[in-house]
Image (cartoon, helix red, strand yellow):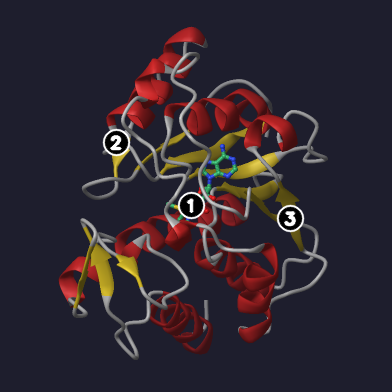
Amino acid sequence: MSDAKALYLDLLKRALTNLIYQDRGLIEGETRPFDLRRRGEGEDWPEHAHTMIGIKRLDALHFCVEDVLDRGVPGDFIETGVWRGGACIFMRGVLKVRGVTDRIVWLADSFQGLPPPDVARYPQDAGLDFSHRKELAIPLEEVQENFRRYGLLDEQVQFLKGWFHDTLPGAPVERLAVLRLDGDLYQSTMDALTSLYPKLERGGYAIVDDYSIDACRQAVGDYRARHGISEEIVPIDWSGVLWRKESGRTA
Ligand SMILES: C[S@@+](CC[C@H](N)C(=O)[O-])C[C@H]1O[C@@H](n2cnc3c(N)ncnc32)[C@H](O)[C@@H]1O
């Protein structure tokens, strides 16, 4: 990759995490001044930045996207749980600099925040009620406007609006090279894996943002156990993990 393309992607990460203008962030319900280490680690909910995943998880996403392109693993990219859209804006940016025109970045979200936990069906989600957190409810139009501001909103960006259990089973997504899960809850993680992991191509990546949350980690463990998935889980940072799919659909 040329120096200019690498510089663009580096600047994109800095802009998406707002290392440039350095906004405040919410940590455990309290608004705190910008803290470079915490933002880099994806520890706060930024006031303005377009992603909360931090630089390390953006770097990991960058690696996965470039790697599937380099190895010719077919398929689109999806994130389930997009918030302001920053991680997906980054994926679209990589496709742009690589001149890739035949892959779509899919954004699945309610665009109204998390569902209340369905404890009767998913007791693992007890105590995880984020449904009233208005900071997590970002309307679809705002996410589209964020893409527009980076000059990256076009037909290679597609939106799946609604609860995962409604939108994902029949989603018109055929094959995936990168599956990024960021829905926090057991239910949200399980719904996404159930509908989408079978569409992930061999050689593609599953990335889990919320492995630090017990409920999410349990959903990943239950799904992997049920389907005999034994690929090594590689830690990214204090919360994110990933693995490369080595069996199943043929690349
Ligand atoms: C932590 S945020 C995602 C952060 C984002 N990936 C980023 O780059 O900053 C979680 C998102 O998941 C969405 N979400 C969680 N569970 C969901 C579900 N079951 N159906 C639809 N959206 C869901 C919420 O609306 C919210 O936008």
Task: Say what amino acid the circle numbered 3 marks.
Answer: Phe
**Label 2 is placed on what type of residue?**
Ile
Q: Residue furthest front?
A: 132
Q: Which residue is found at the position 80% from the left and 59% from the top?
A: 102
Picture residue at 63% right of the left edge, 69% below the top: 143
**Residue 153, relative to residue 67: is it above or below?**
below
Rendered position, 100 above or below 209? below
Q: How far is the residue under mark 2 from the one under mark 1? A: 22 Å
Is residue 59 left or right of 179 when viewed as pictured?
left
Q: Report helix, strand or loop for mark 1.
A: helix
Rendering quarter of residue 225: top left
- Residue on which disc 1 sits: 64
Residue that mark 3 sits on: 159
Badge nearest the viewer, 1 or 3: 3
**Of label 2 and label 3, which has the lower sequence position?**
3
Residue 213: image tag: 2
Residue 232 in view of the camera: no
